[in-house]
Image: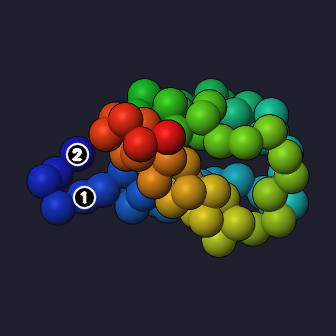
């Protein structure tokens, strides 16, 4: 991952391979089949267990997850 590249941008590159709508399990299956990188797979595994209607829907969940993780690291849960 380059310095300017964020995990969100990496997820966005790979999430295009998924068919929507999909469940989290379907997303993870596609990630395994397409051999997503470990960092992208980790983000997908941390997503809430629900149906995602679109790439944008997944990216919203990724951004919420990143914010939650940042707050946890700072001890502000």
Query: x, y (%) of residue 50?
Result: 84, 46
Q: Determine whether, in the image, residue 73 is placed left or right of residue 18.
A: left
Q: Is residue 31 visible?
A: no
Q: Residue at x 86, y 60 (%)?
A: 21
Q: Which mark is residue 56?
A: none
Q: Determine whether, in the image, residue 3 is placed left or right of residue 66.
A: left
Q: Secondary structure at mark 1?
A: loop
Query: x, y (%) of residue 20?
Result: 81, 61
Q: Residue at x 65, y 42 (%)?
A: 47
The image quarter containing residue 75 is: top left
Q: Is residue 46 visible?
A: yes
Whether 38 is drawn above or below 23: the answer is: above
Local crowd size for mark 1, using a 10 Å CA cut-off: few (<14), some (14–19), many (≥20): few
Asked whether 15 or 50 is in front, the reply is 50
Query: x, y (%) of residue 22?
Result: 84, 51
Asked whether 27 or 43 is in front, the reply is 43
Query: x, y (%) of residue 67?
Result: 45, 54
C-alpha separation, residue under disc 1 versus residue under disc 2: 6 Å
Extreme-left residue of the structure: 3
Q: Which residue is mark 2?
A: 1
Asked whether 4 or 61 is in front, the reply is 61
Give the quarter of the figure containing the N terminus: top left
Q: Residue at x 39, y 61 (%)?
A: 9
Question: How many numbered circles are shown?
Answer: 2
Q: Secondary structure at mark 2?
A: loop
Q: Which residue is mark 1?
A: 5
Verify CB contact (< 8 Å) between mark 1 and mark 2: yes
Q: Residue at x 82, y 65 (%)?
A: 53
Local crowd size for mark 2, using a 10 Å CA cut-off: few (<14), some (14–19), many (≥20): few
Asked whether 62 or 54 is in front, the reply is 62
């Amino acid at each position: 991952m380059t310095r300017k590249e964020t995990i969100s941008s990496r997820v966005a590159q790979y999430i295009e391979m998924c068919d929507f709508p999909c469940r989290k399990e379907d997303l993870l299956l596609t990630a395994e089949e397409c051999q997503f990188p470990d960092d992208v797979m980790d983000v997908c595994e941390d997503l809430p267990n629900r149906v995602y209607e679109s790439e944008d829907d997944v990216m919203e969940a990724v951004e919420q997850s990143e914010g939650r993780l940042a707050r946890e690291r700072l001890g502000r849960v």
